[in-house]
């Protein structure tokens, strides 16, 4: 699956502040102990939704409890006031927004990580057990490739394709990148139940959340013609629909929250594609 990537801009997404990892034993500092760690998530956020799905697939409700946060942060700078004590305890004179997702250490009342990919990997490797592995041995490079495709070829490309302030040539290039990525994934999925293995892996989680964002957020800023071309990938969208029927996926869909978060953060113009939804996500969303 080869895709022409778009150049990343440092301002597109704030860099994570905390990058601690959970290790195997006491020598690591943050070592794996059931009940020691807690997740703080908003499933209206793509990173939070990815972690929530991972958490449910691994069955970690008691091993690593999750606290779910409102879709729209309650602080003017875009953070959650309930997370402020954790940030202030973890970084001297911390002045940034107290954003989610957060993996915290309940023993010390501090933050371990705010970086969703690291959190997902640590949940799987330190607490997942033998019954399921979302990062199977030998699959890391494939999963990383899917992560890049989703981040650059779907999410970033869709955002730029629908940008009201961009030049027409730039928007066309972004749309071409998006369609090229979707086409590569469509061809790859033909005859397959899942992306890279015969069972669900983190690659499927990454792709599913990217498609949720594409159809519930980015669609609002694309024209009807672009949406028709995006929808013309039946195998890809059938894969998304099948995963949405799984409780670990659809059970975390907060469509109202996604919409409220989008409108709170985005001041772009709504386009003709906003009225053309590709999948009926509500049929599988949490009630």
Image: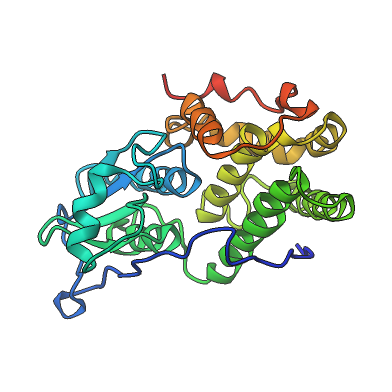
Residue 91 position in % (x across, y down) = 24, 67
Foreground of the two, 82 or 20? 82
Residue 13 visible from this viewpoint: yes
Residue 180: quadrant of the picture: bottom right
Q: Is residue 271 left or right of residue 59?
A: right
| Residue occupying the point 24% across, 61% down | 111
| Residue occupying the point 70% across, 25% down | 277
Q: Is residue 274 left or right of residue 128?
A: right
Foreground of the two, 102 or 63? 102
Foreground of the two, 98 or 145? 98
Residue 223, compared with residue 197, is above or below; it is above
Which quadrant does the C terminus fall into? Answer: top left
| Residue occupying the point 42% across, 64% down | 16
Q: Residue furthest left?
A: 107
Which quadrant does the N terminus fall into? Answer: bottom right
Q: Residue furthest bottom?
A: 27
Residue 165 position in % (x across, y down) = 76, 47
Residue 234, compared with residue 158, is above or below; it is above
Residue 25 position in % (x across, y down) = 18, 75
Residue 176 position in % (x across, y down) = 85, 52
């Amino acid at each position: 699956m080869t895709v022409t990537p778009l150049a990343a801009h440092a301002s597109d997404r704030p860099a994570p502040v905390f990058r601690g990892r959970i290790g195997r034993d006491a020598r690591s500092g943050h070592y794996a102990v059931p009940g020691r760690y807690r997740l703080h998530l908003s499933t209206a956020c793509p990173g939070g939704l990815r972690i929530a799905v991972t958490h449910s697939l691994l069955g970690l409700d008691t091993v690593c409890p999750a606290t779910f946060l409102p879709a729209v942060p309650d602080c003017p700078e875009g953070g959650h006031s309930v997370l402020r004590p954790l940030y202030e305890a973890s970084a001297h004179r911390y002045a940034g927004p107290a954003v989610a997702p957060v993996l915290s250490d309940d023993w010390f009342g501090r933050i371990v990580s705010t970086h969703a990919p690291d959190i997902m990997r640590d949940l799987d490797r330190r607490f997942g057990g033998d019954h399921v592995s979302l990062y199977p041995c030998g699959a890391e490079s494939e999963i990383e490739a899917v992560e890049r495709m989703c981040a650059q070829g779907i999410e970033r490309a869709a955002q730029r394709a629908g940008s009201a302030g961009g030049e027409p040539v730039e928007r066309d290039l972004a749309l071409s990148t998006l369609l090229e990525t979707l086409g590569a994934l469509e061809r790859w999925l033909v005859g397959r139940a899942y992306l890279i293995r015969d069972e669900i892996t983190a690659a499927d989680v990454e792709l599913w959340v990217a498609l949720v964002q594409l159809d519930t957020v980015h669609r609002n800023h694309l024209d009807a013609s672009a949406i028709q071309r995006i929808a013309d990938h039946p195998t890809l969208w059938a894969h998304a629909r099948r995963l949405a029927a799984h409780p670990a996926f659809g059970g975390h869909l907060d469509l109202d929250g996604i919409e409220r978060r989008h409108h709170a953060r985005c001041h772009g113009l709504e386009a003709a594609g906003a009225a053309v939804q590709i999948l009926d996500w509500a049929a599988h969303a949490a009630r």
